[in-house]
Image (tube, grey):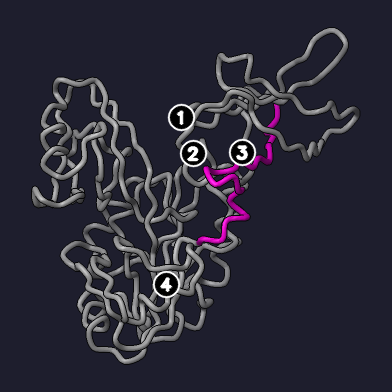
Amino acid sequence: VVQVPNRMQTKVETPVKSGDLNPVWNCEFEVPGYQKGEDLVFKVLDKDPVSSDILGVITFPANSFQEEGFDGEVLLEEAKGSKPYLKVSISGPTGKYPQEMAAASTFVVALTKPLGIEVDATLSLVKVCKIDEGGSVSKHNSTAPQHLQIQLGDYVAAINGSIDKEAVTKATEEATNVQMVIRPCVQMTVQVDNKRQALGLDLKYTETQPEITIKSFKPDSPALNKLQPLDRIIAVDGFEQAKAMVDQMKRAQDLQSMSFRVKRAKPFPSSGPVDISRLTRIAKDDRGLLPQPINPTSATALVQIYIRSQPFGGSDKSSSGHRYDTIPIANGMINAGMSCQLIHYVKEEHDTFLEVCKQFKAIVV
């Protein structure tokens, strides 16, 4: 049974599977009357002529599927004496399921000089801030499918294997042939229940810009775990342009909640539940990694070392930048109900790395 909480008119049911301890329903349907922002409840029932006992329940918060959809196995709650899992796919706003969506968290583009772009390297990620007509980036965009086009605001994660910001910036200006790893951005709405508290955000902006970048948070910020460092705010409660957005944020102590429209580097399977956005993303992709549990029994991380002087980061690595055994180990932990995020140690980020690691219950090295 699937429905919006407390709205019986949205309820839909699968056919009953009789005499099967491992039922596969393989049903697809739309939830009638569903409205954006509503949660979804899935219930598995033991059907009999007298009553229907609940075998397990899981609630999907809207923010767990609203932007990208969801595809994975989840551990059901309220189960008695067992640990039942339910395989669920929820389509995103495009109507496609996550496994059908072509866009990855990163993609690679081969380009030649002149690139015809300008970048901003003043923060921890290098951002595309201008694309000139006639350059190889513009020519690439004219023929590439939309999900493989380089857009304003996307991040340059690496060029010719280097993740160093100065080297990346220099290569955009001088290199003749480049392989560029692009991390695209997505837009999303984030609700912050600040309860008349100041937001406690350290921001980067000028009043004439259309967006504001979040640099960091104060420890008691009510926006922690909702917004993220490097989120680029493009609207606050419907107000746009930096000056109007800042003025609205100054009113936080008069407001119970606030709505933020942000641009954020496209999430990948390792991007949550613990916020690791302050760490440099080394791996090209997390292909094969299962979705993280919605309600993990424990938050863990698997730490890897990338040797920059070696192809792929070392002889034990695949072309993704992960060790050959990393994905199977992580999937085993995810199947056991834990979250397992894949991170790399970068020596220049030593102190930040240790701060991020404090948020995990366990670290696998």
For the point 53% across and 76% down, which residue is it? Answer: 318
How far apart are the two marked residues, 2 and 3, measured between alpha carbons?
A: 17 Å
Residue that label 2 marks: 66
**Label whose residue precedes the other's in the sequence (4 or 1):** 1
**Label whose residue precedes the other's in the sequence (3 or 1):** 1
**Amino acid type, label 1:** Gly
- Residue extending furthest toward the right: 19
**Label whose residue precedes the other's in the sequence (4 or 2):** 2
Which of discs 4 and 2 lies nearer the camera? The answer is 4
Which of discs 4 and 1 lies nearer the camera? The answer is 4
Over which residues does the magenta segment extend? 81-103
Residue that label 3 marks: 74
Mark 4 touches mark 2? (CB < 8 Å): no
Residue 227, image x, y percentages = 29, 41
**Label whose residue precedes the other's in the sequence (1 or 2):** 1
How far apart are the two marked residues, 4 and 1, measured between alpha carbons?
A: 33 Å
Mark 4 touches mark 1? (CB < 8 Å): no
